[in-house]
Structures are given as structure tokens and as C-alpha cells.
Image (tube, rainbow, N blue to C red):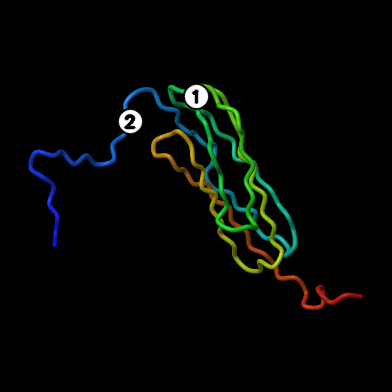
Amino acid sequence: RVVKPNANEKVEPAVKPEGPLPEFAFNEESHDFGTINEGDVVEHVFAFTNTGDAPLIISSATGSCGCTVPEWPKEPIGVGEKGEIKVKFNSRKKPGVQNKTVTITSNTYPKQQRIKIKANVTPAPKDADTPS
């Protein structure tokens, strides 16, 4: 059975909240580490500015897998202020082309932003794992 909204009820689509909002302006939203060797741990800093009208508060930043670990500012970023999100990627047991995403949840609209990293991981020699 299909339930139709009552003709007197307004069904609001997800709308942008009213009032001042913070806004991310990243210098870049993706980074390519190029070719790295399996086992390398690399990191990149994504710089951003709050170009909105209210303090920017990042509640979380999560990597698409355990090999991708972001660090983000825990304090509010004021209007016009700059911040950084550092993303560390561990290529251990990750041979081949890797595309990873960091999802940032904040008090912006929309609530989630994504930044991406990429690497071409050269496989470690097969005998590298054997104990000597």
C-alpha cells in the first residue's frame, strides 16, 4: 500500500538551513602520491579556509579503510581562518593502484565533504616477508 502525504501537509525536501553557515574552501580536494613502494607510509596535508559566515566545527574525519588515517583540528575554525587535515596512508599489503577517500563531517551544508588520495603501490618482493 502506498501512503500519500495528506494534502494539507507540506513535505519539505532537505533544504539548506537558514542563518550563517561555515564553508570549506580546500586548496585541493585530491592528492596523488604517484608511485610508492609497498610498505611505505606517506602523508599529505590538505589545507582549507573557512570561507563561510560562522565558525567551522569538524566533528569527525574517517578514512575509507584502516590504512587511511586522517588528523583534523578539534577546535572551531573561525571565519576566514585556515586549517589543515593531515591524511596518512599505510601501503602495507596494498599493492596496485589505490584510491582512498576521507569523509569529513562538520557543521557545514552539506554536512559531509570528501577529500581523496591516490597511489600506485609497487608490490614488495615476494621474499620480503620471509624471516631471516
Picture coordinates of residue 34 (x, y %)? Answer: 64, 57
In-image side of 77 versus 71 (left or right) = left
- Secondary structure of residue under mark 2: loop
Task: Kindly give the residue lying farthest to the left in the view shown.
Answer: 7
Residue at horizontal 73 percent and vertical 63 percent from the top: 37
**What amino acid does circle 2 point to?**
Pro
Picture coordinates of residue 77 (x, y %)? Answer: 55, 26
What number is the disc on residue 28? none
In-image side of 55 versus 1 (left or right) = right
Rate crowding at label 2 as few (under 14), some (14 to 19) or many (20 or more) other CA atoms within 10 Å.
Answer: few
Q: Which residue is mark 1?
A: 55
**Mark 1 and mark 2: Cα distance apart in space:** 15 Å
**What amino acid does circle 1 point to?**
Pro
Picture coordinates of residue 117 (x, y %)? Answer: 58, 52
Q: Is residue 23 above or below residue 95?
A: above
In-image side of 106 versus 38 (left or right) = left
What number is the disc on residue 17? 2
- Secondary structure of residue under mark 1: loop
Picture coordinates of residue 32 (x, y %)? Answer: 60, 53
Residue at horizontal 67 percent and vertical 64 percent from the top: 121
Q: Mark 1 and mark 2 in contact? Answer it, CB < 8 Å.
A: no
Rendering quarter of residue 73: top right
Q: Is residue 56 above or below residue 113?
A: above
Rendering quarter of residue 45: top right
User: Is the C terminus in the top left, top right, bottom left or bottom right quadrant?
Assistant: bottom right
